[in-house]
Image (cartoon, rainbow, N blue to C red):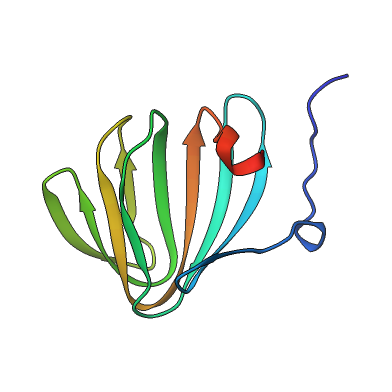
Amino acid sequence: MGPKHYFFGSEIPLEDLGNKIRRKVLAYNDNLMMVLVQFEKGAVGKIHSHPHEQITYVLEGEFEFIIGSDRNVVKAGDSMYKEPNIPHGTTCLEKGVLLDVFCPYREDFVN
């Protein structure tokens, strides 16, 4: 059996992570994953790291990000790269939505 090709948004649950953050795991396979993350104003994505490469695109809102020792405010249309194992986190300054891409996929998000 080959890879799954279609992931219909209406069939994917929006997972409440608590602390004003919700997540929807979109399309993925063993090598790649796309995740939509919704933040309410004031929500904090705690500093963490993981062995995956990650690219984040800001769809809506405004966020203060920390990546390693660098701190920046980003808004809709901006994007960021996070290499494996770099500490990173965010505070939502204005209600927003992020689109995260991981390589390889986040097994912990689907199990």
Q: Residue at x 32, y 57 (%)?
A: 46
Residue farthest to the top, as pictured: 1
Pick the front one: 93 or 107: 107
Q: Position of residue 5 (x, y in %)?
A: 79, 36
Q: Quadrant of residue 71?
A: bottom left
Pick the front one: 16 or 69: 16
Q: Quadrant of residue 8?
A: bottom right
Q: Position of residue 13 (x, y in %)?
A: 73, 60
Pick the front one: 45 or 81: 45
Q: Is residue 74 above or below residue 94?
A: above
Which image quarter holds the N terminus? top right
Q: Quadrant of residue 105?
A: top right
Q: Is residue 102 above or below residue 1?
A: below
Q: Residue at x 83, y 21 (%)?
A: 2
User: Is residue 69 found left or right of 95 in the rendered image?
Assistant: left
Q: Is residue 62 above or below residue 9?
A: below
Q: Residue at x 25, y 36 (%)?
A: 86
Q: Position of residue 66 (x, y in %)?
A: 21, 54
Q: Position of residue 88 (x, y in %)?
A: 27, 48
Which image quarter holds the C terminus? top right
Q: Is residue 3 above or below residue 6?
A: above
Number of numbered markers: 0
Q: Residue at x 38, y 80 (%)?
A: 41
Residue farthest to the right, as pictured: 1
